Amino acid sequence: MNSYTLRKLPEGFILTSDEDIQIGDLYYLPRTNSIYECKEDPTELNLEKDFGIGKVIAQQHQIDFYALSEEEQKEIGWFDVKKLANDAYNDSLSTMAESVVGVSAYIKGFQKAQELLSDRRFSLEDIKKAFQAGDNFGREDYIGNSREYYNEDEYIQSLSQPKSWKVELEMEDGGGYRQDSMNGCWISKWQPKLTNGKIKITKLL
């Protein structure tokens, strides 16, 4: 069975698979932490899958995160603020009349989101924007009598490492069979299930 990985890029989350890349597929390249389209013979890409290259099967708008627990959402740094607000609203309905719940329940939901996000780490993109707002990607500090120069690369070096998590997806029988490359036997062809155009992550592994 294929292995699936959730990756966090500056522009959003993607899901990658270790299945073979074909011409026309999108693929993820770890050394640039970016997505590209395969336009030539993908043999070399498939031979380098051990280095983290993977076929992109979904981008952020095609991923359903709702099945993840709050702890898992916090681990990857993703929260559905609207859902938290709605949950707070529904919880309040069980203890008071709907007419008095109003916006106060939504406020509780947003406060919950703020609490979960309180220890949020700055992303690589956050730091880049901060330097762009400064004086030309650089800073000059005086320490004692010495002058030291700092540039954005020194500050963001630790942040530039790609973040990823092995995940379990909701699957369905894709129909037909495929031959297992390890032992040659034929096995059912399971594939990620699409619901309303989205692939659901059921848990982090």
Image (cartoon, rainbow, N blue to C red):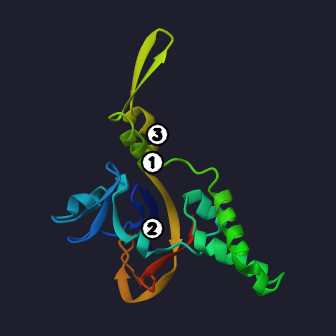
- Tell me the distance, in whole angstroms, between the alpha carbons under discs 3 and 1: 14 Å
Using residue 15 as the reference point, say whether residue 113 is left or right of it.
Answer: right
- Tell me the distance, in whole angstroms, between the alpha carbons under discs 2 and 3: 27 Å
Which residue is identified by label 1?
126
Q: What is the x, y in percent for residue 196?
A: 45, 86
Q: Secondary structure at mark 3?
A: helix
| Above or below, 122 relative to 175 | above
Which residue occupies 35% across, 67% down? 56
Disc 2 residue crowd, few under 14, some 14–19, many 20+, Cα 10 Å: few
The type of residue carrying mark 1 is Asp
Return the mark for residue 3. 2
Image depth: mark 1 or mark 2 in front: 1
The type of residue carrying mark 2 is Ser
Q: Secondary structure at mark 1?
A: helix
Which residue is identified by label 3?
158
Q: What is the x, y in percent for residue 73?
A: 59, 64
Which residue occupies 42% across, 19% down? 148
Which residue occupies 71% across, 79% down? 102
